Amino acid sequence: MKGTLSSCVSYCRKAGAVAWKNVNKTALFSLTAILASALMPAHAQDYFAGAKADVTDTFGGNSAVVYILYVIEIAFIAFTYIKTKNLALFGSIAALLVFVNVAFNVIPA
């Protein structure tokens, strides 16, 4: 076991040196320059501005989608509890319902 860590580190160092030697440095530096350059601002028209109310009504906190998810989650957790008899799964109903409620109230905003 003596020297195992140092041999691993030296092997990684050698592999990194070989990889750096074989890389195309011109392409790497030009790619870095392109990514570092300032981006031009885009001026666009928002075509979906009118649909925001529809999305909030469909996927908002008090929508039918949330209630359908609640029913599916409760049925699935009840099924898994019956199959496994694990109380932790049965107790996860509350955590899952709170998570879905918070997620659907945050997402459309």
Image: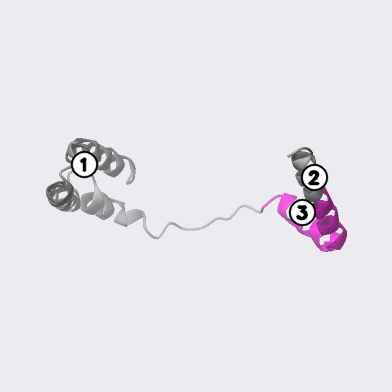
Secondary element at tag 3:
helix
Residue 27 image-quadrant placement: bottom right
At label 3, counting other C-alpha atoms closer than 10 Å, the crowd grade (few under 14, some 14-19, many 20 or more) is few
Secondary element at tag 2:
helix
Measuring from the top left, give residue 26's x and y in whole percent.
86, 61
Instruction: Check residue 89 in the rendering and tell me which mark sits there, or answer none.
Output: 1
Instruction: Check residue 32 in the rendering and tell me which mark sits there, or answer none.
Output: 3
Q: Are marks 1 and 2 in contact (CB under 8 Å)?
A: no
Left or right: 35, with 84 as reference point: right
Distance in Å between CA atoms under marks 3 and 1: 49 Å
Distance in Å between CA atoms under marks 1 and 2: 47 Å
Q: Nearer the viewer, residue 74 or 85?
A: 85
Measuring from the top left, give residue 14's x and y in whole percent.
84, 52
* Rendered position, 23 above or below 4: below
Range covered by the magenta-colored residues: 13-39
Q: Are marks 3 and 1 in contact (CB under 8 Å)?
A: no
Which residue corresponds to mark 2?
7
The three-letter amino acid code for the residue at tag 2 is: Ser
The three-letter amino acid code for the residue at tag 1 is: Leu
Q: Nearer the viewer, residue 96 or 38?
A: 96
The three-letter amino acid code for the residue at tag 3 is: Thr
Q: How is the image coloured?
A: one colour
In what quadrant of the picture does the C terminus appear?
top left
